[in-house]
Amino acid sequence: MARDSVGNTMLVATILCVVCSVLVASAAVGLRARQDANKQLDRKKNVLIAAGLYDEKENSLDEVDSIFAASIEQVLIDLETGELVDTEVIDPETFDQREASRKPELSQAIEPSSKLGGIKKREKYSFVYRVKNEAGEIEKVVLPVYGKGLWSTLYGFIAVASDANTVEGITFYEHAETPGLGGEVENPDWKALWKGKILFDDQGEVALHVIKGKVSPSSADAEHQVDGLSGATITCKGVTQLVRYWMGADGFGPYLDKLRQSAEGGSDG
Ligand SMILES: Cc1cc2nc3c(=O)[nH]c(=O)nc-3n(C[C@H](O)[C@H](O)[C@H](O)COP(=O)(O)O)c2cc1C
C-alpha cells in the first residue's frame, strides 16, 4: 500500500486519536486526586476569608490548613431543625454536601423552586464552620450558601456573628458570571461592604439585600443594604435571593435561632 494512500492516512489518524485519548484520559484520572485536594483547600481558604481569618495579600496558601485547624470547628447540622447531626448517622468525614443535594435520601425539594432561582432540591444536612474565642464560646459561624446568578450557580460562604444577625463577611469561590460584571462578586472592596450589615428586620424577616446603585448612609434602611455592582443587576438579584433563602426559615433560620438563644445563654445544638 502506498504511504499516502487513504488506508494509511486513516490508520495513522486512528492511532493518533487513540494515543491522544489515552493520554488525556490518564491525565484526567491521574490528576483528579490533586484537583479534589485543591478544591478542598480553596473552600477552606474561603471559609477563612469569610471569617476574616485569612488575607490574600498577607497570608499564603501554605498557611490555610494550619489556620483552619487552629481556628475552625466544623460541624454538620440538620437544616430543618438546626440541631447537630449524630455522627453515627452521617459521617462528616465522608459527607459530600454538594453530592448530597442530588441524592433523594439526603435532599429535599425547594418549593417553589423559584425561591432559589429555579434550583429544585437542596441538601438536608449542611456543614457549619464555628469560630470560637479563647473561652470556647462561639464568636461567629460561617455558613455555606449558593444560588443562581445570570449565567451560573454562585457558591460562597457568609459569616455571621454569634448574635445571629450581624454579617461578619462574605465570599464567592465558584461561579461563571462575567469577569468585570457579575464576576465582581469576588472583588474584595465589594465584599468588604458586607461586614457589619444586619440580616433581619424588627419582625425577624431577612431584610439584607443588594440595591441598584450606592447605599445612602442617611437611608433608614442602610444597615440592610449593600451597594449594587454596576452592569450586574441580575447577578446582584441572585445574591439577594440566596441571602434571603439561606438565612431564612427554609435555610439556616432554625440554626440561627438556636445560635441566638445560645448567645443569650443556651446552646446552639
Ligand atoms: C456579554 C455580557 C455579559 C454580561 N454579564 C452579566 C453578568 O455576569 N451579570 C449580570 O448581572 N449582568 C450581566 N450582563 C448584563 C445583563 O444582561 C443586564 O443588562 C444587566 O444585568 C443589567 O444591569 P444594570 O442595570 O446594572 O446595567 C451581561 C451582558 C452582556 C452583554
Image (tube, grey):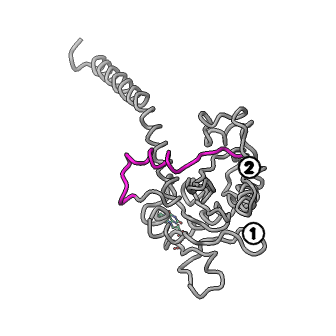
Quarter of the figure that contains the N terminus: top left
Q: Disc 2 on helix, strand or loop?
A: loop
Name above or below for residue 241 compared with residue 82: below
Q: Which residues are magenta?
A: 56-77
Can residue 145 be seen by looking at this rendering?
A: no
Name above or below for residue 259 compared with residue 72: below
| Res. 170 mark | none
Total residue callouts: 2
Q: Give the residue drawn at x 70%, y 44%.
A: 125
| Res. 205 mark | 1
Q: Give the residue drawn at x 49%, y 53%.
A: 46
Residue labelled with disc 2: 269
* Residue 57 placement (x, y as % from top left): 36, 60
Q: Is the shortest distance between ligand 1 and the CB of mark 2 under 8 Å?
A: no
Can residue 266 be seen by looking at this rendering?
A: yes
Q: Give the residue drawn at x 66%, y 69%.
A: 199
Q: Give the residue drawn at x 60%, y 59%.
A: 140
* Residue 33 placement (x, y as % from top left): 45, 32
Q: Residue furthest bottom?
A: 218
